[in-house]
Image (tube, rainbow, N blue to C red):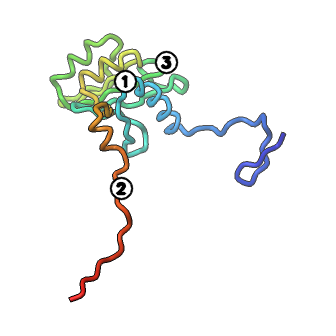
Amino acid sequence: MVGRMSGRAVTAGAKRRQLSPRQRAVEQLRALADPFRFRIQADAEGFPIIPGRYGQIEWYCDGVNCCSCALPGQFALAVYTTHPRLFPKLWAIPGVRRHQTGDTEMRAVFPPDALQQVAAVIRARQKRTQTSPQSLQNLRSGVRSRSQEPRFECG
């Protein structure tokens, strides 16, 4: 069976298009963050981050192309913060390893299992949900007026 995609003939058994590292990172981080409703944004380079009040969680390594990874052979995330009082709290979480530590900033690498604990320390932002009937009514379309003809006053 032959199909056409964007003007080129493609067989049914053809492989899917390879995703860029950024797209793969977005998919992996979104899959981890969705159950906890964490917000995901793109950084300046287009890689995904989970912003928090006291820092951010970043995609670090996919576990496949590990060259100097602190957690070789496994998927890893990183946490970055500029609040020195949080350093010991983050290092106390099982699985969190120091990666770079400065006087006022720190970056640590951790496995996805520790995501919820790390997010609690940096107070990661979550998506808001609409639950009350009044707030749900605010989401509905408010266009209820009829089109009006312009009014001309005769004077």
Residue 43 x %, y %: 37, 42
Q: Say which quadrant the N terminus sits in.
A: top right
Q: Which residue is mark 2?
A: 144
Q: Quadrant of residue 59?
A: top left
Q: Which residue is mark 1?
A: 36
Which residue appears at 51% of the width and 18% of the height? 73
Q: Which residue is mark 3?
A: 74
Q: SS class of the residue under badge 3?
A: loop
Q: Quadrant of residue 111?
A: top left
- Residue type (three-letter) at the residue carrying disc 1: Phe
Residue 154 x %, y %: 24, 87
Which residue appears at 21% of the width and 30% of the height? 54
Identity of the residue furthest to the front in this view: 154
Closer to us: 129 or 63: 129
Comparing labels 3 and 2, the label whose residue is closer to the camera? 2
Q: Does label 3 or label 2 sit earlier along the sequence?
A: 3
Which residue appears at 24% of the width and 22% of the height? 121
Would residue 126 appear left or right of 59 to someone viewing this image? left
- Residue type (three-letter) at the residue carrying disc 3: Gln
Q: Does label 2 or label 1 sit earlier along the sequence?
A: 1
- Residue 58, labelled with which disc? none
Closer to us: 108 or 123: 123
Identity of the residue furthest to the right in this view: 1
Would residue 91 appear left or right of 149 to someone viewing this image? left
Q: Does label 3 or label 1 sit earlier along the sequence?
A: 1
Residue 108 x %, y %: 32, 23
Residue 128 x %, y %: 30, 33
Disc 3/disc 2 C-alpha distance (Å): 54 Å
Q: SS class of the residue under badge 1?
A: helix
- Residue type (three-letter) at the residue carrying disc 2: Arg
